[in-house]
Image (tube, helix red, strand yellow):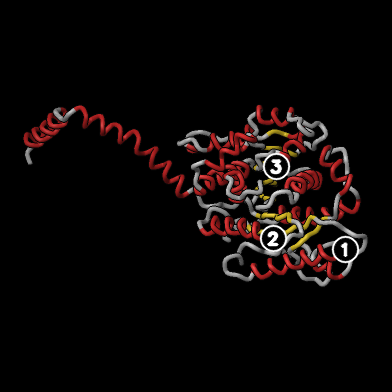
Amino acid sequence: MSAVETSFSARDIIITASERPLGFTLWTLAVVTVLPPLLLFLVYRFCGRSAQRCNNVKVFAFANHKGGVGKSAVSLFAAKALAAMRPDTNILVVDCSVYTDLTAALVGDEGFSTHNTERVRAAGASIDSARSRLLTVARSWFRSFDHRQYMRPVRDFNPRAPANLFVMTNKGDKSSEGAKSSDSAQTISVIANDLRRALDRSGSPWVVLIDTDGGTEHNLTILGLCMSDHVVVPCDADIKGLRRITVMLDTIAALRRHRLSFAKVTRVFFNTQAQPASNDADQELGLNFTAKEETRRAMLEISHEFERLSRTAKYRAILVPDEVTNRANGAPTFFKGLRHGGVTWHRTMRDPFSSELSAAVDADLATLFRDLDHLSQRRLNLDQ
């Protein structure tokens, strides 16, 4: 082709392009402008939704579909204990219960008083605020997510709290709308991953303790299960409650099946009444005390059912007795037990950083908290 022909062809192309309708040009400009960010968003949503482990962040959720079994109370005492045991580790409490009882106990609100809890919300220290930020279209590629903006030191509201204890609450009644939210489990998993990675990038070790509501279908509870490495199940000695626990296990199984969570149930914790001594049957249940006969029978029935479930294909990967703590005969135990706390329990719930539990109850809880501490220090197998 001659130089003249080449020049003519190029001129024809320029003229042809200039004669195209304005609508075509605007449509091309819109596609070029919108398509790349949209593709980035879709890649982030569908590639970033799979659960990812972080060695600097260990997450424990206290969960049970049944309410009133001690999730908030045991979460509170675990936060206090781990903050004392690991002063160089950041302990973050994420309150995923819309009743925010755990937040109120941490910051010192009693009864109908919500002064400090409202201050926590006003400071933006809520999982709802973090969620709104993390759901921006551009995500962390174009906008930074500073996790510290969405949590506060508990000491800011309760001066008796340890310096390494932080709280992230929720919007209470307004958060109950989350149960009706259109957010899918995939979207919730992306939020969980973003938050976990933000903590991991800080370079400091974090232990996250999550309190959940009785209803596992609430989006805040789903978020807690998506974030978790380990699930601790406080329960009472009521075989009927096991039906509700299996609903929670089904939820975890579904999340794991879609690679949205790697949570495992590694502890079941009985809240029960007590008598003064201990015998072999109680030790088999991981108890340091003798339970009432009818209570022991119910707990044995529950433990046998858990054992049966753990052998099924559906729950084998979820119900995992960890070998941190052993029974007297040397076999690993899946269960722990707490005797009735009485007056000291209620007093310590009202003022956790000044009051102490009775020696017996404190000893019962200590066995659980040593396990949690051990698990929090264990490096994860990131290939599992």
Mark 3 burial class by Cα count in 10 Å: few <14, some 14-19, many 20+: many
Residue 208 appears in the rendering: no
Return the mark for residue 290.
1
Q: Amino acid at mark 1?
A: Thr
Q: Amino acid at mark 3?
A: Val
- The tag earlier along the polypeptide, 3 or 2, is 3
Residue 374 in percent (x, y) is at 75, 56
Q: Residue 15 appears at what percent x and percent y?
A: 12, 29
Direction from residue 202 to residue 156 in the image, left or right? right
Q: Is residue 375 visible to us here? A: yes
Question: Splitting the image into 4 quarters, where does residue 276 fall?
Answer: bottom right
Q: Residue at x 70, y 37 (%)?
A: 167
Dot 2: few (<14), some (14–19), or many (≥20) neighbours within 10 Å?
Answer: few
Total numbered labels placed on residues in the image = 3
Q: Secondary structure at mark 1?
A: loop
Q: Secondary structure at mark 2?
A: loop
Q: Would residue 312 be found to the left or right of residue 163 on screen?
A: left
Residue for badge 2:
240
- Image quadrant occupied by the C terminus: bottom right
First reached walking from the N terminus: tag 3 or tag 1: 3
CA separation in Å, label 3 and label 2? 30 Å
* Residue identified by numbered label 3: 93
Of callouts 1 and 2, the N-terminal one: 2
Quadrant location of the N terminus?
top left
Between 9 and 60, the one nearer to me in the picture: 60
Determine whether 225 is above or below 330 in the image. above
- The residue at the point 60 percent across, 70 percent down is 312
List x then y, in percent, for residue 132.
54, 35
- CA gap, disc 1 and disc 2: 22 Å
